[in-house]
C-alpha cells in the first residue's frame, strides 16, 4: 500500500505538487482573511456590550451551520472554483477568532484599566499595552481553532472545483480507490496536525509566565507496597 501511494504521488500525470500548492494556498489565504476581518471587528465590538452580545450569538449560529452548506451557498453568487472556496472557508474561520477576541478583551479586569487611566494612558495605549497583551493567549487560541478547522475542511472545496487534495478524495470515493483517498486524506491530516502543534507553541509563547500553567502527573505510592493509586493531576504556576 505504501509503495502504491508513493507511486501515485510521484506520477506526473496526477499533478500532486500542483494540487498540494493549491490546497496550501487556499488554506493560507482563508486563514489570513479570517484573521484580518475578525480581529479588528472583535476589538471594535468588545467595548459595546449589546453589539458584542449579538456578534457572539450570530457567530455561534454560523458555527452551527454545516461546512458543506457554506460551499453550496456560495455557488449561486460566485460560481465554482478557487474564489468561492476561499470566501466560504474565510466565513468558516471568522467565528472562532471573533469570539475569542471579544472574550479575551472583555475578560481583562476593569480595575487594571482604571489604574492605567489613572496613570494617564490614552485609549490606544491601554488597548495596545494592556488589553491586547492580556487577551493575546485567548486570541491565539481562537486563531489556532480557526486554522485547524479551515485546514481540515478545505477538502470539501473540491466539491465546487477548487482543486487541492480534496480532488483525490472525491476521485477515490468515486473509483473506490483507497490509494487516491489516502493520497488526499493523509497530507490533510499531517498538515492539520502541524498547524495544531505550531500554533499551540505560539499560544504558549505569547502567554505570560505568570498565567501559564504546567500540568504534571504523579503517582501515590502510599496505598501499599507494589500498589499504585490512580494518577492525580496538579497544576503548578510557572
Image (cartoon, rainbow, N blue to C red):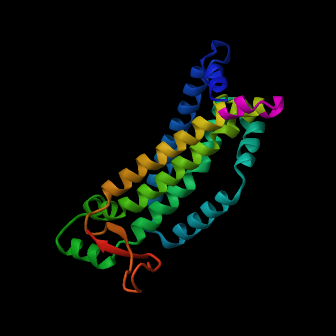
Residue 10 pos. (x, y %): 60, 17
Q: Could you say which quadrant of the image residue 73 lies in? A: top right
- The verdict on residue 190 being magenta is no
Residue 90 visible in rendering: no
Is residue 176 placed above or below 119 in the rendered structure? above
Residue 154 pos. (x, y %): 63, 40
- Name the chief secondary structure element in magenta: helix
- Image quarter hosting the N terminus: top right
Residue 205 pos. (x, y %): 31, 54
Image point 51% across, 43% down: which residue?
31
Is residue 128 placed above or below 235 in the rendered structure? above
Q: Could you say which quadrant of the image residue 13 lies in? A: top right
Image point 63% across, 19% down: which residue?
7
Is residue 78 placed above or below 229 in the rendered structure? above
| Image: magenta residue range | 173-182
Depth order, front residue of 107/4: 4
Amino acid at each position: 500500500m505504501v509503495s502504491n501511494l508513493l507511486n501515485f504521488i510521484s506520477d506526473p500525470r496526477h499533478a500532486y505538487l500542483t494540487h498540494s500548492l493549491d490546497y496550501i494556498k487556499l488554506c493560507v489565504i482563508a486563514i489570513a482573511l479570517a484573521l484580518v476581518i475578525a480581529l479588528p471587528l472583535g476589538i471594535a465590538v468588545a467595548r459595546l456590550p449589546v453589539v458584542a452580545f449579538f456578534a457572539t450569538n450570530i457567530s455561534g449560529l454560523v458555527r452551527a451551520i454545516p461546512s458543506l452548506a457554506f460551499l453550496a451557498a456560495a455557488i449561486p453568487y460566485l460560481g465554482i472554483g478557487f474564489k468561492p472556496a476561499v470566501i466560504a472557508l474565510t466565513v468558516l474561520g471568522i467565528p472562532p477568532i471573533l469570539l475569542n477576541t471579544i472574550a479575551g478583551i472583555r475578560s481583562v479586569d476593569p480595575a487594571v484599566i482604571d489604574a492605567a487611566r489613572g496613570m494617564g494612558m490614552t485609549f490606544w495605549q491601554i488597548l495596545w499595552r494592556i488589553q491586547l497583551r492580556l487577551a493575546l493567549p485567548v486570541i491565539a487560541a481562537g486563531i489556532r481553532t480557526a486554522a485547524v478547522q479551515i485546514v481540515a475542511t478545505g477538502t470539501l472545496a473540491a466539491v465546487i472545483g477548487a482543486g487541492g487534495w480534496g480532488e483525490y478524495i472525491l476521485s477515490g470515493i468515486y473509483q473506490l480507490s483507497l490509494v487516491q483517498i489516502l493520497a488526499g486524506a493523509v497530507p490533510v491530516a499531517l498538515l492539520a496536525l502541524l498547524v495544531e502543534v505550531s500554533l499551540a507553541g505560539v499560544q504558549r509563547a505569547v502567554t505570560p509566565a505568570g498565567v501559564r500553567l504546567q500540568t504534571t502527573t504523579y503517582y501515590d505510592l502510599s496505598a501499599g507496597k507494589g500498589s499504585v493509586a490512580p494518577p492525580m493531576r496538579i497544576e503548578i504556576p510557572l
